[in-house]
Image (cartoon, rainbow, N blue to C red):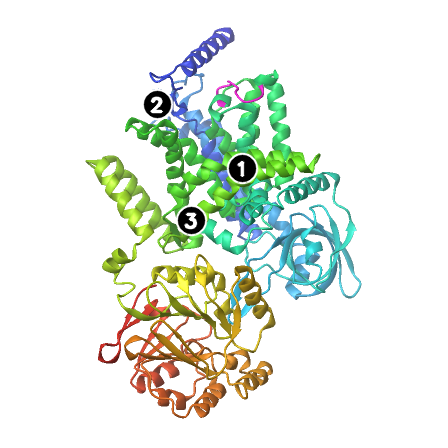
Amino acid sequence: MKTHEAAAERAAADRADVDEAAVDGRGARASSWEEGPADLRLVPLAVAAWVAAAVAVGVPGWWTVAGVVVCLVGGAVLLTPAAARRFGGTARSGEGNLAADAPTGRGTPAWRLRATAFAGVLLCAAAGAASAGLHTADLRRGPVPALAREYARAQLEVTVTSDPRLTRPRVRGSESVPVSVVLDGEVTRAERSDGTVHRTRAPVLLIVPPGEGRAEWLRLLPSTRLSVGARLAPPSRPGDPFAAVLKVGGGGPPRIIGSPSALQRTAGELRAGLRRATDGLDPDARALLPGLVVGDTSRIGSELRDAFVATDLTHLLAVSGSNLAVVLILLVGRPGRAHQVERGGLAPRLGMSLRGTAVAGGALTLAFVVVCRPEPSVLRAAACGFVVLLAIGTGRRRSLIPALAAAVLLLVLYDPWLARSYGFLLSVLATGALLTVAPRWSEALRRRGVPDRLAEALAASLAAQAVCAPVVVVFAGRVSLVAIPANLFAELAVAPATVFGFATLAAAAVWMPAAEGLAWVAGWPAGWIARVARTGAALPGAELSWPGGWWGGFALALVTAVVVVAARRLPHRGPVAALLVVLLLLVVVRPVPLTRWATGWPPRGWVFAMCQVGQGDATVLAAGGDAAVVVDAGPDPVPVDRCLRELGVRRVPLLVLTHFHADHVAGLPGVLRGRSVGAIQTTGLEEPPAQAAFVRRTAAAAGVPLIRAGAGERRRVGGLEWTVLWPAEDSGAAEGRRGAAGSGGANDASVAMLVRAAGGLTLLLLGDLEPPAQQALLRAHPGLAPVDVLKVAHHGSAHQDPGLIRAVRPRLALVSTGRDNPYGHPSPRTVESLRAGGARVLRTDRDGAIAVVGAGPGLLAVPGGG
């Protein structure tokens, strides 16, 4: 009997091999999805373990124990014959269900297969929850969590477990949050202040504030042992994979008590060699290539990162599964051929056997993980690669869907924190879409006459975007409208950049001149990718705001599903699709005449505009044509750049920075981006010093001169003319210096301007002046007349001088402030005082960007440009 079954299986395998070798009429090999239904048996098991781990990571331990017990008992019960038969639906009024009892092709009754499948789901859920429970137990027990709850200081021995990285620059109120070094570690020894010593193993997050030792901290390698004195604090969120956050004191270099392992030293030397080889490249290629090849993102600045975020190209900022795919393709050929045990690539040309190919691929995969670090996407790609290589080594067919499911299952059991990682979720979804949805869409495009390669690339981008965009919305609250074309254009350069980048990495270890030559070659495709990101991000409609959170993600998923169904069933799809593409192009490019006609923004003949930049200031004075004088730059380069693009501003004869607080100057790179700037004018009080230094560095890098404003100074640009009212040399600077130690500070040194625009429109721009400086300004200019527009000082705070408001009696009072800001800006008292004086009050947190049109009786404020 067994001989007959074996013969039948061999015959079926032979038929399958014949089917695989079939080609269609065009000579193209049949797609795997056409050969039969996908093998999805491992998918429910992986999903069960994933969901259970994600839940167990964030609940108390006893809930996890209860869940594990329930799943184990349920699985065990389902595996008993009686329960399995009842579950399978065969016991019905005492009569057997012949259909259910009928054996499958392998002789197993269907009822047993169903029961076994559900038992497997329960057992995998139990395994996922148990793994999560065991991992989270380390975060709740031992001395480290106890010290964190007490916010105690301790002397600790820590083993570094990740590469150091820098936090992103942020603005908090008027201050710029310092950029710190962050790294993961594991505490092995803790010594309390009373001398008590504990041996332990607890994962922690180290935060190192700015200091002289930053360069040494950034050079640390995983497995290095440190002795650090730090204050411990609990993690900021319950689901964080740390027992504590260590805030390292001192600001000096790290105290190393144990060298990294030989493996990590070798990996570190390879990464350092790649950095040295790329030193001579253009800035974008120099920053991007190490990240693309080995995940070294230390050179990628916030401006380039923002461009990649806007175009949904962030998966290219750091190494991912696509890099491993390129490496394995070199060895075994295209994935479809390796899947069918037909090798391409270098292996057959080198005379390597199947098993030799698998071993070589495994070695490459291990080296890839060590050098690139075990990030979620790298681990997923490595696990999936190992499964495929095992299929090659054994000479047996395997579908890539089970390979992906097995990779997910193994990784979630190994590291349950991945179950809550957005990056891991996006990686798995994108890979699943490429394996299931993309081939069908590609074939549909071919049937409509799209060339093969273009159909494959377009289908891959569409499928990945369709499944990933709803997840991106959950945490980002935006949709990229240029993601698909940006990915298509960038994909042209990914493979050559990766291949030559890895060649540079290998050559740098033996001969640096050769490595530099290879890096020069790799720099061309890397620079192309960066240009694609910058070009896409510079388009006015590159991003669309969308409600965030899971409800927003669900809404976008529903919209995507409706669009896909409509695309399949809509009559005259060709012309309709062409029309939709044209409309999307217009939305993204947003030509000013068309945008003005459709939205009314920017209004024709605008004279003054207040940009919506959040909790900060950025205002624009039209100077004729595409020129404008900009006053302040806001806290973030992206919104001020977007505002100036919408207004059609390409030339800035003068940029005035009223004072050096971060909410007025941190967006400076956004004003400089793609525009000619004649000069930057600042106040004389360089407080805070760090932000004044930032302005100097940024201006010097752009080749823009810095000049200082002085009271009484008069200037004219086009139809604009203005007078600087403050700070006065004898009183303003002194007020600012005294305020630096008191309440006014840099605010009282703000540049205040009285502007006269075309048509006689008058505007008073007060920066962030506090009441003492406002009173001094009024004393210095007792003849100050009523104005048409007042830019209310300090975001409409309660600190205003009523005398100045009564003197200028504005018709329009404009307040620049952020939504839901923690300061209560604008103050209801200030708003009421302005309205009592006859002013119409508009604010950017509710009205969006605001433009002023006309003068005299025709004065008009147009809100809603944000």
Q: Is residue 57 above or below residue 812?
A: above
Q: Is residue 372 visible?
A: yes
Q: Earlier in the sequence, mark 2 or mark 3?
A: 2
Q: Label 3 neighbourhood size at 10 Å, few (<14), some (14-19), many (20+)?
A: some
Q: Which of the two residues, 616 or 119, is positioned nearer the viewer here?
A: 616
Q: Is residue 524 above or below residue 160?
A: above
Is residue 346 in the magenta section? Answer: yes
Question: As shown in the figure, which amino acid type bears the numbered disc 1?
Answer: Ala
Secondary structure found at label 3: helix
Q: Which residue is mark 2?
A: 97
Is residue 764 in the magenta section? Answer: no
Give coordinates of residue 203: x percent, y percent. Answer: 65, 51
Q: Earlier in the sequence, mark 1 or mark 3?
A: 1
Q: Which residue is mark 3?
A: 535
Q: Is residue 206 left or right of residue 404?
A: right
Q: CA distance from mark 1 to mark 3?
A: 19 Å
